[in-house]
Image (cartoon, coloured by chain):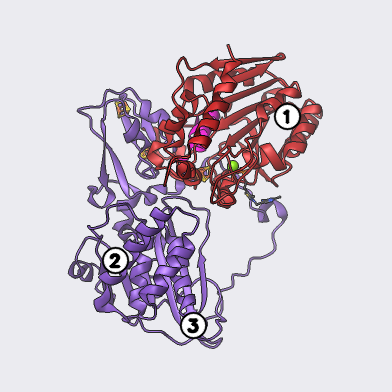
Amino acid sequence: MTPEHSGKAEESPRQRLLSAGTPMCAGCGGLQALHQIYDQVGEKTVFVNAAGCMTLLSIYPYTPFRGSWLYTAMACAPAGAQGVRDALDVLLSKGHIDAGQDQLPVVLTGDGSAYGMGLSATSAAIDRGLDFLYICYDNEGYGNTGHQYSAATPAGARTATSRVDGYTGVKKDLFAIWSAHRPAYVATVIGTEPADLARKVKKALSLRGPRLLLVLAPCPTGWGFEPSRMVEIGKLAVESGIWPLKEYSDGQVRHTRVPAKRAPLEAYLGLQGRFRHMFVPRRNEEQLAALQRQVDDYWEHID
Amino acid sequence: MYRIRFHGRGGQGIKTASRILGTALFIEGFEVQDAPRYGAERRGAPIFAYVRADTHPIHERGVIHRPDLVVVADETLLAISPAQVLEGVTDSCVVLIYSAKPEAWWRQQLPDIAQIVVLVPLESLSVAIPVGALCAGAAAALLGKVSAEALAHAVEEELSAHDAAMVESNRKAILAAYMEVTPWRGLVCSSLPLGVAQTPPPVWVNVPHDAVDIGAPVIHAGATSGLVKTGLWRTRRPVIDRERCRRCLQCCAWCPEGGILAGADGWPVIDYEHCKGCLVCAAQCPFQAIGVIPETQAEGGADAQTADRK
Ligand SMILES: Cc1ncc(C[n+]2csc(CCOP(=O)(O)OP(=O)(O)O)c2C)c(N)n1
Ligand code: SF4
Ligand code: SF4
Ligand code: SF4
Ligand SMILES: [Mg+2]
């Protein structure tokens, strides 16, 4: 008996489509966003999940998904999605399933795959015009293995492999890399802006071809904050301007939310253990100013 | 050989506790193993870590099934049978519990446990110190083989990535916990290493060879994870106050677990079988209608935690 068929759940009409009972951390921002996305993409999907925190969603014999799910190695989730698409096309062409039974391949990976190990397979899948949706939950590090830095780690953030002065690189611009391929759709979202997220998921689902939802995923464990502050931190990421909400389609980039007055970046950084070294034992004015300047420079060119 | 098992929840510094104690024993000249038990569970979930220390090379491997000292950093775990906190505890084993409740109360609750020591939360601490760290300090004293100097060195070594103020506050707190249990210094006795003869062979289950479509880990039903009661992770419980709640249902959207359902009558209903106690809902409710109580004070309801206690 699946939970939705147990007597208890029937009294609760508005249950989320993705089931509870997963091993994600309490306060996981990625899971909060995935609930919203799954409500919209629904169960006629084949999730292709590269190794990362979210591969633990499905651990035999438990899964929160109502539709299909498949595990792949970190570098090859888009190739897995290609295989799923091809298999479905064969079934369709042989008449084993009809169009109403078709499914959408959905790649689900962390930033470690999306920005790094899986980038080559992603690029090739976009080149082939694969009809799929890619969801990257970006927690800005290799969360599942103890939060080492990834190509998505922001400058200055402490991780398990940048333990003292923080990450010396800069966060790779995956939105620009995807857009440069001229795919059907690219959007940045965050679970703490549900209306913006819902509109973008709807838009993505109305199109065909390669589509990316790049989700900033506040991560209490890796970023060092109390789980209860997850939503507050997500909102500050947008209000400070460090996580611009935007979308790409038809060769155009549009910002979907331009903060009228940006919150100081410090307000966002100061709540997270990974940036604590910039504030104590003494404020690193130079670094804080440089990071603020980067955000200001970005928005200077945006109308 | 000393075998020590630390039990706590993800986020309480249990892994660091085992490292601090392991390093302190190493500084004192012991051969040491220390390891966290990794699982799929995360912050808030029951976890454990363990340390072995001996004056001879250690040949035992894996999880400790016959501990000499069990450290309970989170007392709520004692009520949760899957956490297996008391597994393998014999009369010669000491159980250290971090708790504000007196030892006499625990003796009543756990009449089969021969040796109980309670580490009371230290009021004097001005900054929040992970519970695991305090337990490492107390455990070091109970073993009676670790000097305060070695312990202080171990703390500095294990926390070297953090700023000086943080290392100092942890060092002070850990030494305070070490002093706190001085009356029981050396209470834990070492026990002999287990030879092959004393080690029970693993229980083998012979599974007949199945065809791959049934033998492979394929899940055929959807949404089975609802059967996993993540409500057991919770140490604090959000409680909706209907006097204040305006039924805006924002909390349903913010809950990372999908753990607040909208009831037919429009009231939000918290699914305590799955709520992990992140308290995002309480922080975000625009009408401050969600209060927070310690799980230990929760009135019995039909949820995973209370069901498991019964
Ligand atoms: C090729 C390869 N290298 C390393 C690993 C080990 N590994 C498993 S999950 C993980 C982290 C993945 O990071 P990310 O994609 O950002 O996902 P997150 O864990 O943050 O959710 C790593 C390094 C692996 N599975 N495969
Ligand atoms: S480590 Fe971060 S991303 Fe991974 S489950 Fe925990 S909160 Fe979520
Ligand atoms: S957010 Fe607060 S007021 Fe709104 S439904 Fe939830 S508990 Fe009630
Ligand atoms: S504390 Fe609130 S937000 Fe967190 S899991 Fe429980 S019900 Fe959901
Ligand atoms: Mg990641």
Q: Quadrant of residue B181?
A: bottom left
For the residues marked 1 and 2, what is the alpha-carbon distance in whole angstroms? 69 Å
Using the image, name the chain to which the residue with label 2 belongs: B
Q: Residues within 10 Å of mark 1 (few under 14, many from 20)?
A: some
In the rendering, which numbered label is found on residue B54? 3
Q: Quadrant of residue A244?
A: top right
In the rendering, which numbered label is found on residue B176? 2
For the residues marked 3 and 2, what is the alpha-carbon distance in whole angstroms? 26 Å
Hue of chain B?
purple
**Residue drawn where x is 35% and y is 25% of the image:** B249
Using the image, name the chain to which the residue with label 3 belongs: B
- Residue A35 covered by magenta stretch: yes
Amino acid carrying label 1: it is Ile
Element under label 3? strand
Front position among marks 1 and 2: 2
Instruction: Reply above or below: B229 against A140.
Output: below
Q: Residues within 10 Å of mark 2 (few under 14, many from 20)?
A: some
Write down the region rendered in magenta: A28-38
Q: Residues within 10 Å of mark 3 (few under 14, many from 20)?
A: many
Front position among marks 3 and 2: 2
A262 or A93: nearer the eye? Answer: A262
Residue identifier under label 1: A97
- Is residue A59 visible to the viewer in this orientation of the structure? no
